[in-house]
Image: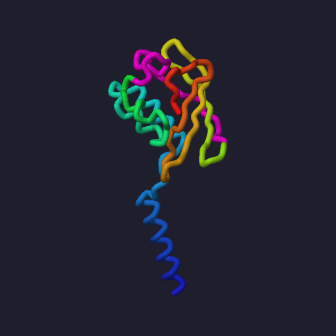
Amino acid sequence: MKKLIIMVIAAGVVLLILSGCPMGITIESRIGMFESDLNSSDRSDVYLNFHPDTSSYNQIKDPDYFDGTPLAAIYKPIHFSNLSDSVDIGNGQERVTADFSSLGYSDTCTFIMEQSGIDWLIRRFDLADFNIQKSIQ
């Protein structure tokens, strides 16, 4: 009987591993997805990286939203690197800083991330030395 219980538990563990327990989209993966979407020729999915409660959410749906900023398509390739460890800032939000670069531009940036279900989404994005006139928050 003891062997049967151990075999059933082992089989359950194997099934969980093989079925790919849903872990959600991590902060690092979300930032990578944002970068990939910004570098895509079709930017219509960029907004999906942002939390739906972001005040600019409907404006971000416009693929040209970032024109006039270092995130504009003309400055591709866009790259985020050296992501910091996330810091809990309360209200279910985490802050991550990173190095940002695009064609002819480099800076540090800050992501405020918020969990929605099991996925992390961008709630706010700031470039340290660039005043994006359209606030992304």
Does 105 appear above or below 8? above
Please provide the residue range marked out in magenta: 65-88
What residue do we see at 46% from left, 60% from top? 17
Does 68 appear above or below 33? above
What residue do we see at 49% from left, 67% from top? 13
What residue do we see at 46% from left, 30% from top? 35
Residue at the top extreme, as displayed: 104
Pick whichever, 52 or 86, lies toward us.
52
The kind of secondary structure the magenta stretch mainly shows is loop
Q: List x then y, in percent, for residue 71.
A: 47, 22
Residue at the bottom extreme, as displayed: 1
Pick whichever, 12 or 75, lies toward us.
75
Q: List x then y, in percent, for residue 106.
A: 57, 18
Pick whichever, 25 or 131, lies toward us.
131
Relative placement, left or right, of 116 versus 41 is right
What residue do we see at 34% from left, 31% from top? 44
Pick whichever, 21 or 42, lies toward us.
42
Does 117 appear above or below 4? above
In magenta stretch: residue 39: no
In magenta stretch: residue 75: yes
